[in-house]
Structures are given as C-alpha cells and as structure tokens.
Image (tube, helix red, strand yellow):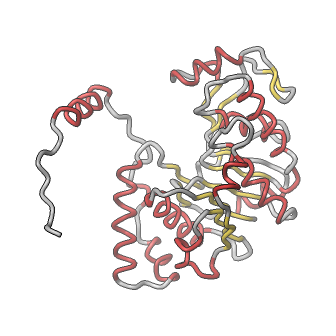
Amino acid sequence: MNIVYLVFGTKIENYQQAYFSIFTAQLHKNDDDKIIVITDDSSLFGFFEDKIETIVINQDTIRDWEGPHQFFWRVKIKALQLVAQKYPQDSILYLDSDTFFYKNTAVLRTALQSGNQFMHLNEGKLSQLSSKTEKLMWKQMKGKSYGNIIINENVAMWNAGLIGVSQKHFECLELTLQINDAMCADGVTRRLIEQFAFSLGLNQYSELQPADHIVGHYWGNKKQWNDTISLFLRECFMKKYHFDAVVERIKDMELSKIPIRIKESSTQRKLKNLIDKFYTNQRPVYVKK
C-alpha cells in the first residue's frame, strides 16, 4: 500500500502538518507500506532521507493538472493517477496534510487489497446538507448526469481528507476526473467539486466505507493542532532527535484529547473580525539599517 501526500506552495504550516502526519503513519503502517510525498520542493523533506519517496513536480505540471478550467484541486486527482501509473500493483491511501493516524492501518490495507474503497467519512446526502455551498450545489445539479451518474436525493458527499483507492479499481480515478471536469464545464460552484467527484467516482466501483476510526482529520480545529505540531517539531529538532526517536515520541502524545473540530460561534467570529478591522497595531518600530 502506498500512503500518499500532496504538498506544495509556500505555507510552511502545510509542510509541518505533513511532517506530523508522516510520523504518525510511520508508527502505524506495515513495514511493506511506502510513504510517498508529491511536492514542488523536495528539499523541505530532506529530514526523512530514505524513509519516504518524494516525487517532484513543478509549476508547469501543476498548471497543466489544473486542466482546461484551471480548477486548483483537480491536481489531487492527477496526483493519484500519477502514483497509480507508477505503482499499478499497490493500493493508494491518500491523506491531506491535516491528518494523523491513531490506529494501525492493517484493516484498511486488507480491505483495499480486497477491492474496497474509502473516504474519510460520509458527510450526508447532498440533498440534505445545510451549508450554503452544498445547498447551491444541490440546486445546480439535482437531476443532472455527470459521468453517467444521476444526481438524485440519495447521492452522498464524503470528506476527502482521506481517499483509499484499491489497486483493483484504479480506473475510478479517470471517472472521477471526468465528473470533476464536467461539473467545472457546467459552472457548478467550485469549492467542493473535487471532493464530490471523488465521492461519486469511487463509489461507482465499490461502495465507499469510512476510515475515521483509523485516521483523524482536524480541518475543524487547525489553529490548535498547528500550535501543538509546531511546539512538537521545535522540541524534536532543537533536541536533535533522529527519525526513530521522533516516532517514539509520538507514542507519548494523547492525540485523542485534542478536538478535531470546534464549532465557532458566529457572534465570536464577527466580533473578532470587527476588532481586527478597527484595532490594528499602530506605529511599528524597526531596527536601524
């Protein structure tokens, strides 16, 4: 099984998240599993040496992967196709960088080998979801067909923080790409297109199963996790821990005590935005040249 990450751009937080997720993967994976990072800057992963494989892509490749409609997250689909082409005999377990393993991966590995497919969790039927984006998507797509799949009341939106593709069904990635591009061409609101395309494309080949009992996805509490990870990495690198020592340190962390989602009060968010707008820092002082 190939455990795959896609990390590019300039936000250092994304790379720190990927580091932490890779350490947790190393703790819980099988010895035969390979960790692959697709990135535009392999130098940022030099610490891992031969513990991971890096596949380097450049900005031209990223722009090409965005496709004719220049949809940013289309690159996720193309990245998984690249790994599938390079390793056609190995199932793929893709993870966003803001994830962590907290249980052994054996159950996922065995299920993927048998032809099962995974996404992080089922967020619900698109027709019943409540966010503005999801309501608009349902209004735009209901009754239409994408990749010969009818968007009816029962199609579900799955979270794409984890995507498990069996080596038996790699052709589902091409279907996912076709669905993604058809939605872009149809003018569907873009924020969740690739996520919904994966939900439809993978499920067409094998009924999707959740993997949130193995992997945590803290998209709903990134600030606290980023702070925790930053402190963790500072300690590890300032004390010059080698790779195995960092992985051992993960064992001592009580990851279940840090919430992966926190529902922020809308009033609190509005007050914070108001304060940031009207009470910015004044008269900064700099050192002299």
Q: Is residue 218 above or below residue 2?
A: above
Instruction: Give me the residue at 82% from left, 65% from top.
Output: 86
Depth check: 280 or 81 in front? 280
Place of residue 73 in the rendered image (x, y in percent of width and height, measured from the top left)? 64, 43
Depth check: 113 or 130 in front? 130
Instruction: Give me the residue at 32% from left, 27% from top.
Output: 266
Q: Is residue 162 left or right of residue 145?
A: left
Number of callouts in the render?
0
Place of residue 226 in the rendered image (x, y in percent of width and height, measured from the top left)? 39, 56
Quarter where residue 5 is shown: bottom right
Q: Quadrant of the N terminus?
A: bottom right
Q: Is residue 154 above or below residue 21?
A: above
Q: Is residue 243 left or right of residue 38?
A: left
The single residue placed furthest to the front in the displayed view is: 289
Quarter where residue 29 is shown: bottom right
Place of residue 87 in the rendered image (x, y in percent of width and height, measured from the top left)? 83, 65
Instruction: Give me the residue at 72% from left, 54% from top.
Output: 79
Depth check: 46 or 250 in front? 46
Place of residue 206 in the rendered image (x, y in percent of width and height, measured from the top left)? 83, 42
Instruction: Give me the residue at 78% from left, 58% from top.
Output: 82
Q: Quadrant of the C terminus?
A: bottom left
Quarter where residue 137 is shown: top right
